[in-house]
Amino acid sequence: MNDEKVNSAISTVQTSVSDHHFVLARNGCNMCAPLGASIAYRGIQGCIPLIHGSQGCATYIRRYTISHFREPVDIASSNFTEATAIFGGKQNLSTALGNVTRQYKPEAVGITSTCLSETIGDDIPMILHEYTAARDASEPAAQEASYPQIFYASTPSYKGTHINGFHTAVHSVVTKIVPAVRCTKRGSSVNVISGFVSPEDLREIHTIMKEYNVNYTLIPDYSKSLDGPSWEEYEKLPDGGTKISDIRTMGQAAGTVYLGKAVLNEQNAGLWLNDVCGIPLHQILLPVGIENTDAFFAALNEITGKTTPAEQAEIRGRLIDAYIDGHKYCFGKRAVVYGDEDFVLSVCAFLRETGIVPVIAATGAHKKVVTESGTGEKLETISEDADFETMLEKVRSLEPDIVIGSSKGYYLSRRLNIPLVRCGFPVHDRIGGQRILTLGYRGTLTLFDLVCNALMQYKQEKAGKGWSYV
Amino acid sequence: MFEVLEARKKQVFINGQDNFDVSCDKASTAGAVSQRACVFCGSRVVLYPIADAIHVIHGPIGCAAYTWDLRGSMSSGPELHRMCFSTDIRENEVIYGGEKKLYAVLCELIDEYKPNAAFVYGTCIVGLIGDDMDAVCRRVAQEKGIPVLPVHSEGFKGTKKDGYHAACDALFKLIGTDDTTPVSENSINILGDFNLAGETWLIENYYRRMGVEVVAAITGDGRIEQLRRAHRASLNVVQCSGSMVHLAQMMEEKYGIPFIHVSYFGIEDMTQALYDVAERMEDRSIMGKTRAIVRRDVPELLKKLEPYKKALQGKKAAAYVGGSFKAFSLVKALRHLGMETVVVGSQTGTKEDYEYLKSITVPGTVILDDTNPLELSKFILEKNAELLIGGVKERPIAYKMGIGFVDHNHERKEPLACYEGMLNFAKEVYTSLMSPVWKYSPARIRAVHLRDRSELFEEKDTADDRSASDDRIAAAAGGQK
């Protein structure tokens, strides 16, 4: 395009620039879809993510997630070159599938697309169809059982955020593995489909489900694969993850609990199970805070026909006790909350229970996603397409007392000179981001202690001579 | 046991056993889980430290999110480089083009932040939707009166090295635009140091003590005005061979500035760097001052290193880094600590680089080009390394294998360059290797168990020398793979 043509194209938007609403992201607070998809795929047993795009996509996402989880996160890449971009990614994707299968001997490969592969119009389902047909023709049929499952999530980076990638990947696994037939006789097991939470949160869900003493399938489950023990021998693909055999039974479950509401219908595996297999869906906000957690247990009680486990009722009592003990330190305090849509919604709900007022609830989610989530929740509190600079500009006059979110809000809290309670993703500047618990009564209790203590510490440090008891 | 992929066999060598018919400098093998990034990454890391410019990433949010605050490059003044601006391309731009948005973004940012220049990075998608970044940048530069430099760093158009190349091309456009500010004839540009943890400042301090003027540090603590007059320095001193040789070559061709290669890591290389610079300065008194610095600083350092060397003697290390020059220095620096490098590799080395690595390592050393986690873990185990030097992506490999780790990459918070850095390096190696935590590591426990068993068979006396026994632990583990 010549200069003249560019200039005329540009002049049409000049007027909209003058109102000083930034059209870009300045220190953005969301990530791209392939990142979320890769994390979800690591929550399937023996599954290695394969990003169909440039080498950098895989490497950047690895680096970003390794810094949070502090675990090996191997993600393969089909490694586009210029020729690939011109002639299509078929050859590279096939080579990558072959190499990653040879090296890792995975049970599954989770392929994600990228802005690059989507824009050149690679038809990945077609490529995969041809790949498996050629593979099956050239190798003995007896080997078939050892072939990895291949999942595919369409995750163009220009559409949605990492959260959309996460849900899309889970959807791709469920729809591939679960037979698409109407269930005639539902069993007693429970499907728990989780949004993007920490490995510690997933372990808490396991604890709760075990207390219910029912069969269940938790998907995705990176509670061990992204937060494992120290090893005796180097593991190619860390142990842990939802078993494919368990996923297969999800179509006969008594019901599904979906943790998180900011999910588009076409990315919602719970909705698919409901529509196709007839498994009742209970879609709830992340169980953070008393009321959201009550809703979680109400759903589980309804599906299982049981009552809330006694252990949980006890923790709930302790949580209320803690709320009361700490109420004076919290009431009227003003918080900045940012992160993924579901994280922000549930943390804000929790804060309101304690008397803390969220003055900014920000998410990098694209407007389209939020309006289409159809949750009926008070989404207007969320400033969509948020970034950290916009937050900073808006927040000064709001006089907040505390910042709650990932470690990317560190500069915000530093410039405001108020405490930051780290939770969500990513936590890059501390140890243990993967072990931060916020789900359930126990998680709420942990979060409450953190928030309350941060406020108490701040007051103590700012006081003239300090004190050693309150 | 894991086998090296057929396609990678010409990138994995054992010193003394192979003919070194290296096939490097090529795109990574698809599906091999390379530790490399992309073209964009190469450009981004090189230009990142320029602190009074805005860095605008024209692409979807991911490329910007993953490189925000990526490097620990420090600035003595403005900190615009620590902001991360993204045009946050959406479906609309993919269909209708991103030029309008890019123009709007640049205008807004320049008005708001008043930078001295803007770098605009093209990502994969820009290369596909056909945005004419050059035309937009030209127009904004004209309207706003500052340099607006397109960086053609579409991720798929080559390797990280091509990204370095694109960054150098952008820098070269700035160089030569200031002919008025006086510059000494004993002057240099520092190329390829990025002021991680303030390393450029340490280096500059040595040159100051020698009487050498630093015209521009490219790009550590970088400023646009320094770059503009960089063409008048009398010598380009290039560290980080991969990233900056292209710029040095262009400057030699256009402005007749000679360049030399140096490394500031380790004792020999740091000393050599200072002498090599002094050698090329007009003022002969500089050599005398340099000698005095070396004579004062090196014995002092050696004395301080002594206790570390004593503790670390005989331990084996693996190193996997981005540029091969750093690998050379690490092999030498480790030797100063009494340690041998048994596995070494780089993301971007050339055939010559690997030949050189072969010449400075002992027979049996594994030399790797563009390796991956499975190969690294295999060779660390086979060669009984007890320490891995690398970046964040390599860290969990070391930790899961129950061996020490030193971060020699972007994120490091301790300077590792110059003599001061060598001492920090020794401390960090020592801190990681001597930590009591390893005795709880199942991998380490298994190694001890295997050692005990092998000792029983061999009926050998147990020596109480700690490092020797540790060697046997690792040897036993390697033998049982």
Image: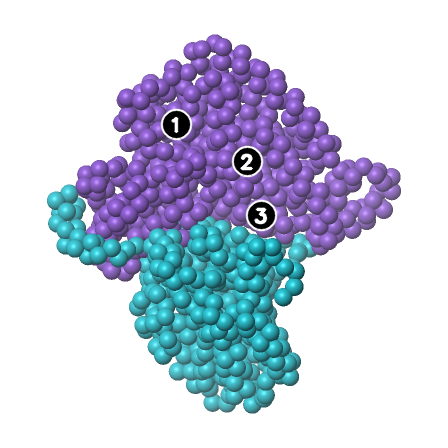
Image spot of residue A311 (x, y percent):
65, 80
Give me the residue at 30% from left, 68% from top.
A368
Tell me the residue that label 1 is attached to: B216
State which chain disc 3 sits on. B
> Would you say residue B142 is visible in this rendering?
yes
Task: Give the structural element (helix, strand or loop) at label 1.
Answer: strand
In space, the residues marked 1 and 3 are separated at their CA atoms by 33 Å
* Left/right of residue B70 with respect to residue A438 in the rendered view: left
Judge whether A176 appears above or below A25 on screen.
Answer: below
Tell me the residue that label 3 is attached to: B395
According to the rendering, which colour does chain A have? cyan
Tell me the residue that label 2 is attached to: B415
Residue B416 sits in quarter: top right
Task: Give the structural element (helix, strand or loop) at label 3.
Answer: helix
Residue B135 sits in quarter: top left
Looking at marks 1 and 3 on the same chain, the residue that comes earlier in the sequence is marked by 1
Judge whether A442 appears above or below B77 on screen.
Answer: below
In space, the residues marked 2 and 3 are separated at their CA atoms by 18 Å
